Image (cartoon, grey):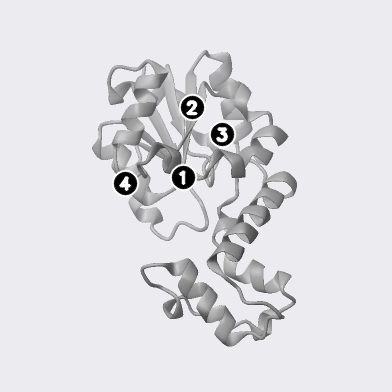
Amino acid sequence: MRYAIFDLDGTIVDSMIYWRSFEKEFLREMGIDEKEMKLSKNDWIGSDWVEALCNFFNKNYDFDFQLTPEKFHQWGIEFMMRKYANDVDFKPGAHQLLDTLKEQGVKMCVCSSTDRSIMEPVLQKYDLDKYFQFTVHCREYGVEKNDPQVFRYCMERLGAENPAEVAVFEDAAYSISTAKAAGFYTVGMYDVTEKNADKVKENADQYVTDYADLDLSKLPK
């Protein structure tokens, strides 16, 4: 294999559990006992879920401050940066796979929906930049991974001429479906937070729970 595009969260590092538990973690830091947590996502799903969530919390909890979307957003950034720095570890076999691909001269990049500034602590902790030619961040680029344009952009920057030359490593159903439909070779990594794991399996050329089980001989030549 000559080219690979990696997602970060849930694919290289085991961080999605923290991204998916913002609400509980915030209340826990506010001193709310888990037995007292009133959490029902149906109460805050809307066009702006952060604003709806803040309204839900302000209504149901007696904070000594008014929770605003700006405050919650800043808390979320700081929370994830702490988790990246202190608690987040590699997905099973990921470190060894990156070492192997680097030794083989594979050109690799990260394509993530997470901003570079937020993930910086985990990049530094594991010296991940040494594996990758560059990192691409969806918000900065202007396209999320439900649009194949972002994968094609990564492909071109890596130097590949067509998607069949490139392996895309993902844990999320929507992004691996996008990559598969666009003609990329796809590797699905199991993540406990992905509710549509069957869709990941369906659209993955290989699906693993540990990269030690990945058949390298089947990757694009």
Question: In the image, 214: left or right of 151?
Answer: right
Residue type highlighted by circle 3:
Ala
| N-terminal label among 3 and 1 | 1
In the rendered image, the vertical position of residue 40 relative to residue 161, given as above or below: below
**In the picture, residue 167 is in which quadrant?**
top left
Question: In the image, 214: left or right of 166?
Answer: right
* Residue located beneath label 4 in the image: 146
Question: In the image, 60: left or right of 142?
Answer: right
* Residue located beneath label 3 in the image: 212
Of badges 3 and 1, nearer the viewer stands 1
| N-terminal label among 2 and 3 | 2
Q: Are marks 2 and 3 in contact (CB under 8 Å)?
A: no
CA–CA distance in space, label 2 to label 3: 20 Å
Residue 107 position in % (x across, y down): 48, 18
Residue type highlighted by circle 1:
Ser
| Residue 16 appears in the rendering | yes
Q: Secondary structure at mark 1?
A: loop
* Quarter of the N terminus within the rendering: top left
CA–CA distance in space, label 3 to label 1: 26 Å
| N-terminal label among 3 and 4 | 4
In the rendered image, the vertical position of residue 99 relative to residue 146, given as above or below: above
CA–CA distance in space, label 2 to label 4: 18 Å
Q: Mark 2 Cα within 10 Å, few/some/many (few <14, many 20+)?
A: many
* Residue located beneath label 2 in the image: 109
* Residue located beneath label 1 in the image: 113
Residue type highlighted by circle 4:
Asn
Q: 22 or 172, which lies in front?
A: 22
Q: Secondary structure at mark 4?
A: loop
Residue 46 position in % (x across, y down): 38, 72
CA–CA distance in space, label 1 to label 4: 11 Å
Q: Mark 4 Cα within 10 Å, few/some/many (few <14, many 20+)?
A: some
Residue at the spot x=67%, y=56% of the render?
Answer: 79
